Amino acid sequence: MAAPKRFFVEKIAEEVRLEGEEFRHARNVLRLGVGDEVTLLDGSGKEYAAIVARAERNALLLHVAGEKPADREPRADVYLLIGALKGDKTELVVQKATELGANRIGVFFSRYSSAYPSENKLERLRRVAREAAKQCLRARVPEVEYFGDLASALNSAENYKNKLFACEFLERSEQTSDTGGSYCLVVGSEGGFSEEEFALARSCGFAGVSLGKRILRAETAAIALLSVVMARAGELG
Ligand code: SAM
């Protein structure tokens, strides 16, 4: 039997009104009606069982039956900083980072970036993260935010214990002691990083990481580095 459909709502209460885009998806695509069971998520990491109690013209009224165990959120707190990529590749990275368990995703614009920020793109990235979280049955949607330059992106990771900077011109990874807990991973855009940007990252406490002798596409590097860190943190089986 298929798992109940999942919806993110602002706030959980005994009665919840499902409106807007989530309502249209529930009615028009999923054809949900009175008596159907759904799972509600408020982004806290908890899940709630609910039943469709009433169908209105522009909303479904849901009766919340109670909290359900949610055990798919990672124990490791992982933050991915990715250089803005061309086309829909940033969306691909946001989708895969969500599935792999990142809690936070920052998109930055650095010296060799050839993609440019827009509010529409950021809204689209947040929608991709929400849909990916629903698909992989997570109870939390990673935050997605923009940084106008590399320095502000690096500074946003100040409190992360393990800071790794994927650097394509490094012969081998710098030695670091994995203290567990929280990780910030930085991957460049198609244009990569300058020596000065690498030096700036090191001054912010980041250790250089090599992903081998081949130059990976940015989206490959982001997925590979996230997978390695998640596996080491015991999050992949
Ligand atoms: N402009 C660079 C070049 O042509 O040499 C390529 C940049 S690469 C497409 C994009 C990003 O992926 C890099 O900035 C780095 O963060 C990461 N990356 C790719 N290959 C890597 C490797 N072998 N080791 C470490 N990081 C790598």
Image (cartoon, helix red, strand yellow):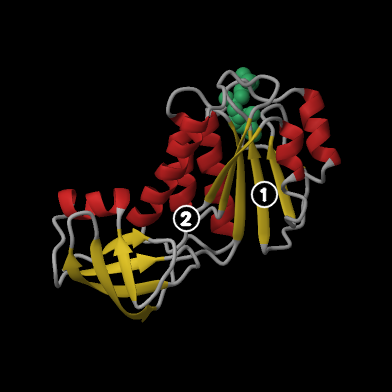
Q: CA distance from mark 1 to mark 2?
A: 17 Å
* Residue type, mark 1 in image: Cys
Quick one: 178 or 150, which is closer to the camera? Answer: 150
Q: Is residue 208 above or below residue 45?
A: above
Residue 47 visible at all: yes
Give the residue pinned by disc 2.
Answer: 141
**Near-viewer residue (181 or 35):** 35
Question: What is the secondary structure assignment of the residue under circle 1?
Answer: strand
Q: Quadrant of the C terminus?
A: bottom left
Identify the image quadrant of residue 178.
bottom right
Q: Position of residue 25 (x, y in %)?
A: 24, 50
* Residue 65 place in picture, x, y as percent: 30, 81
- Does 16 sit above or below residue 222? below
Q: Is mark 2 within 8 Å of ligand 1?
A: no
**Percent x, y of residue 31:** 13, 56
In which of the image's four quarters is ligand 1 placed? top right
- In the rendered image, the residue lying farthest to the right is 203
What secondary structure is marked by label 2? loop
Q: Position of residue 160 (x, y in %)?
A: 72, 55
**Residue that lies at the very extreme toward the bottom in this rendered image:** 66
Q: Which quadrant of the figure has residue 161? A: bottom right
Residue at screen point 76% across, 56% down: 159
Residue appearing at x 56%, y 27% in the figure: 117
Category of crowding for the residue at label 1, using alpha-carbon neighbours closer than 10 angstroms: few (below 14), some (14–19), many (at least 20): many
User: Which amino acid, by three-letter code, is at mark 2?
Assistant: Val
Q: Given this view, does label 1 or label 2 mark the residue nearer the observer?
A: 2
Is 56 above or below relative to 105?
A: below
Q: List the residue tagged with mark 1.
A: 184
Q: Residue furthest front?
A: 57
